[in-house]
Image (cartoon, grey):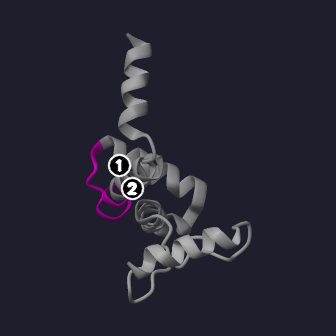
Amino acid sequence: MEGRLARVLHVAFDGHGHDVWGLALVVVGVVCGLGIYLDSAGPLGHAVASGAGVAFGLASWTLPMVLAGLGAILIRGPRRSVDATGDDLDAPRAGSGGESFEDEHAVTARCVR
């Protein structure tokens, strides 16, 4: 049963690990914020606020924003440079090394069509 569950989870989250971790960080940031700023996350929020206070002191007030911000960065992922035509500027270009003369003309012919 565990092997099958592991396979299902692997297939479901394949390539989306950064999204899952980002969402987890945002949720933890919200819970920390409820506990630290509003003192309204119940026993978990009280424990988080106390633990953050012990670990970070007054800097614990920034912890929820930092966690949520890091989560948002993970969810957003790396940005690729795209020009006005929608071409990916980070993609390898013909003639940039490693391609033969024929490969460069094949790319040019496909673009012209």
Please tell me which residue lies in front, 11 or 43: 11
Q: Secondary structure at mark 2?
A: helix
What residue is shown with label 2? 32
Residue 7's spot in the image, x, y percent?
Answer: 42, 24
User: In terms of image quadrants, where is residue 1?
Assistant: top left
Please tell me which residue lies in front, 80 or 18: 80
- State which mark lies toward you, 2 or 1: 2
Q: Secondary structure at mark 1?
A: helix
**Identity of the amino acid at label 1?**
Gly
3 horizontally vs 95: left or right = left
* Magenta stretch holds residue 63: no
Q: Residue at x 53, y 79 (%)?
A: 89
Q: Residue at x 48, y 66 (%)?
A: 66
The correct choice, above or below, for 60 with respect to 22 in the image is below
Q: List the single residue furthest toward the bottom.
A: 84
Please tell me which residue lies in front, 106 or 63: 106
